[in-house]
Amino acid sequence: MPDLLSMMKRQQALADFGDLAIQSENLDMILTEACRLVGEALGTARSKILEIQSNGSELLVRAGLGWQENIVGKLRLQMTDRSSETYSIKAAAPVITQDITREDRFDIPQFLKDARIVAFVNVPIFVPGGHPYGILQVDSTMPREFDNDDIQFLRTYSAVLGPVIDRLQLAEQRNIAEERRSADLAAMEELQRVSAELVGEHDAQSHYQRIVDSAAALMRSNAASTQTLDHATGRLQLMASRGFDPRSADFWKWVRGDTASSCGQALEAGERIVVSDIDRFEANQHDREAYRYSKIRSVQSTPLRAFSGRIVGMLSTHWHDRQEPIADDYRFFDVLARLSADLIERVQANDRLRESEDTLRQFGEASQDVLWLRDAETLQWQYLTPAFESIYGLSRDDALGGNNYRGWLELIVPEDRAIVEDAIRRIRQGERVTFDYRIRRPVDGGIRWLRDTDFPITDASGQIRVFGGVGHDLTELRETELRLRTLLDGIPHLVWQAVSPGEWSWASPQWTKYTGQSLSDSLGWGWLQALHPDDHETAKHAWAAAIEDDGFEVEYRIRRAETQSYHWFQTRGTPVWDDGGSISGWLGTSTDIDELRKLQVRQQVLVSELQHRTFNLMGMVRSMADETIRSSQSLADFKPKFRERVDALARVQRLLSRLEEGHRIFFDDLIKSELAAVGAFGEDSNDRVRLEGPGSVALRSSSVQTLAMAIHELTTNAVKYGALRQSSGRLYVGWRVERADSDGKPWLHVEWQETGVAMPASNAEPRGTGQGRSLIEEALPYQLQARTTYIMAPDGVKCSIALLASDQD
């Protein structure tokens, strides 16, 4: 039983820990202090807390007292059956090791031995609900008999730890979620600001610098850069950067697509390049030095594509520490990249226009707002600011003269006068009204768009005596909106907006044009009717998990109204957060990936076909080698025979490669190729060979290889012994196509006839290996279901082959 002083220390440790748990929200600090207090209370000066990791197979030394720096927060222990920590957690009971030199129940971790630990005790920590968090372990470098009072104190201490850890973990999770929401909100606000600023009329350099600053903020990077592509030279020019050493900026001032930098490789590949570790990046010495100047460890470079699909520049972000961004990290960055591409294209267009027109430099400059006061009873202007003259093209004196309300209405285009008069009526009734309208300038007849915000002004009695107004020239903004609308119409994606999961509030013109749905038909869940019926549940499931997953990405088929066919689309949805951290709506796009899926299927088919063909080819080479060995007298005899057959097989493979290019293989190409290989066809051939048959008789791909080898064997035999060797010999090859009466399939009939050949006596030694005859009489019927004959006639070899041809016209 502990003495009074020890009991007081333990009570004090519990009290101190309780006070700290109430005051602090820092889990790491709480755990570290918990280790210190328990170590002091038990007089060991060493303790630690081990946390079960998310994979459930490891324990991390999360906090500790009296341990080296490479232990706390770094050391991980495997949760094996021989681990005392694992046993303690599973048994939900303390485990004591009084002397590790005599411990035979468990394996002792090496780091405990290295630290000269003699005895230790494990006490499991459970959070509310009975879920294990980890282990409280108290260590002693001196022999120690941990008694029942020690264990009861540690159990009490562990019981206090559990709820505290649970509370702080929940707070930590809430903080992470809140930080994510705040980060997303900050990113959207940043995009909103930068998109508004990019529309403004600032010099291009300030726009480029704004993009760089925004990219670094969105990707939380230490450095960033933007480049424009000079299409004349194919080089990227650095326009703005931040976080670069001057030597790096100078080195990357111009970058070609064939360089070893990330932006150069991204330009050449036409897609984003991510380098998580520069030390493992295949770059040359100069590029590596440029990265090191700026202490860059990781980098990503994203090509900027205009709506035309053409790359106009590059946007890169750089980190000092190793980074591996995931797809979700680029959500807002990719929006910035699209804005950047639009800006670069606009700047380049403006630069071209400025070269030809000096007046374009003044286009889009924001006019000053015009302010006025109007009598609420007579509607006559009482005051106008000088900006009125530049907007309306009319002097203030002329505008204020006579019945200026009637004169003002006459400046408004007739189609908009009803809108203006209704707004004036509502203002006189006490409403604050904002309305848009057009005027025609009397000086030049030009049309200007204006937005007025008018508001009543009451006197001390509450009566409306006058009302004021602020007039803003919207002409440039309207033109910008028109350009943006035109750009939106040109986006290849189907764009939509939802007020709640799955309930659309808007669909882009691309959606209505593609699906044939009207805007009203697509609202709510109406858009679901444009999907393939089998994909409805897939779409609903994606929306059901959207809030929990903070967005979604799903593939389903959408009906194309023009052809009534279904195409595969990839749909992405992203929540829009309001200032209160709530989802105010959803934005999403649907991208046509039908061709990509078809290409993927085609690729799988081609790979399978290649594997099958390679297997067959290897089998034929092996069989051909075996047959040649059996028919050869020596290695010298084997070598030319085998080479000839391999050459013939190679010619077949060249023909077969045409299949991958969408071509077919015709019999006349096959026979001519083989005869040409021995000089019996072509410019150098003589007139002893006659070919007769229709052109473009397509062969089935499965029959080409075996048939070609049979033709090769006939040709080789004729060259060595027959019609192509003897001067009196003649060779006739004829072919025709007939369709079978039973099924109408085309059959190719080939006749090989040698004449004028002096054949050996019947009792003479046989000529050749017999492999060709065996191939014709056995392999062709077996493999291709061909019908064949092979006759050694008195004047030469006679062979016929009939096999199925391709039924493609």
Image (tube, helix red, strand yellow):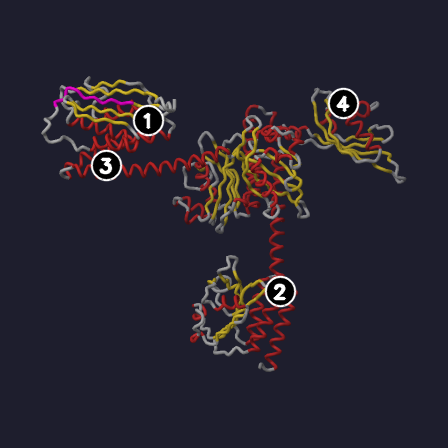
**Is residue 752 on the magenta stretch?**
yes
Callout 3: SS: helix
In the rendered structure, are the residues bearing label 3 and label 1 in contact, judged by CB atoms less than 8 Å apart?
A: no
Nearer to me, 301 or 509? 509
Query: x%, y% of residue 350?
Result: 57, 28
Q: Mark 3 points at which residue?
A: 624
Q: Name the residue under label 4.
A: 411
Query: x%, y% of residue 452?
Result: 75, 31
| Magenta segment | 749-758
Q: Nearer the viewer, mark 4 or mark 2?
A: 2
Given the image, on which type of amino acid does mark 1 rest? Answer: Leu
Number of dots carrying numbers: 4
Q: Which of marks 4 and 3 is in front?
A: 3
Quadrant for the N terminus, please. bottom right
The local crowd at label 3, few if under 14, some if 14 to 19, many if 20 or more residues have their Cα within 10 Å, is some
Nearer to me, 516 or 758? 758
Given the image, on which type of amino acid does mark 3 rest? Answer: Met
Q: Mark 1 points at which residue?
A: 804
